[in-house]
Amino acid sequence: MKSYIEPLNAADALDVLYAHGIPFGDISYSRDNDEDAVLHGPGGDKVLRTPDDVIAALGDDAARALAEHKRFRERAVRELMVPVLSDGESIYNVRTGDTFILDSNCEGKLYGFDYTVTPLAALVDEGEDGIPYGAGVYAIETYGADMGHIDDLPDGECPDPLTLHSTVEDDDLSYSVASVLRSMERTALELEAGGDLFDLSGWTLANGKSIAATCARLGIDIAPKLHTDPASVADAARRAAGTCTADMPRSRAAHL
């Protein structure tokens, strides 16, 4: 069994600790069961099968990291991934510009996520009345097929948003959804903003109002700046006149 929220076995718990920078000594993984791990120490080898085993062996730092991981994932799923899968929203980071755009069709087939970096300043420039331009729409209009892509498993279906909060069979775990959540958490850790990992990470829905609200909460200035640089003016004109091209995947055009 797998979960988008928390590790359900020792091997997955150790992956979380590695991402959070928690040392765990000499570890090997069981040949018989890839969910188990073996901790090698002066007192002999100890088999770890569950996250509780990992906490018992590695102590308070492991417990704090796993709890922080769970808190981050619960909010990332509830506040971001559920609206993405339900309403075709996109995800944006106001600190880094990272943008994830759902790539699916109207029949519920999940192709994965498109990925690019969209500067906040560009969204502010293109916005109106103090509301930035939507990051997902901007990325599609500006970068189109040049965006990176996180593929999902073949013949994958968009997960039911309700299943994101529950355990699922290993084969039912969406690779691309899990990859985006891992990337979001890794970015939050790399920012080292302190405090609540999710609150200060800058992740938000990619529509203009959500971006504006997140910037206001984090104290990020998005007051429009006057730009006279010819290149930026030409770029704005090009995008204003642009439309979806014939080679743009239908799923992207459908989100506009």
Image (cartoon, grey):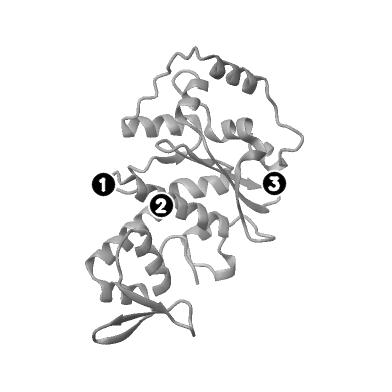
x then y, percent, for residue 10: 39, 74
Q: Which residue in the structure is indicated by mark 1?
A: 195
> In the picture shown, does residue 237 fall above or below 212?
above
Decide: few, some or many residues near mark 3? Use Cα within 10 Å; few <14, some 14-19, many ≥20: few
Relative to 80, 109 lies left or right: right
| Rendered-image quadrant of the C terminus | top right
Location of residue 140 by image quarter: top right
Mark 2 → mark 1, Cα distance in angstroms: 14 Å
Using the image, determine if residue 82 lies above or below residue 45: above
Q: Is residue 9 visible?
A: no
Task: Look at mark 2 in the image and give the residue it sits on.
Answer: 185
Height in image: 131 above or below 104?
above
Q: Label 1 amino acid? A: Gly
Q: Earlier in the sequence, mark 2 or mark 1?
A: 2
Nearer mark to the viewer, of 1 and 3: 1
Q: Which residue is mark 3?
A: 106
Q: CA distance from mark 3 to mark 2?
A: 29 Å
**Residue 79 location, x and y as percent?**
44, 46
Q: Secondary structure at mark 2?
A: helix
Q: CA distance from mark 1 to mark 3?
A: 39 Å
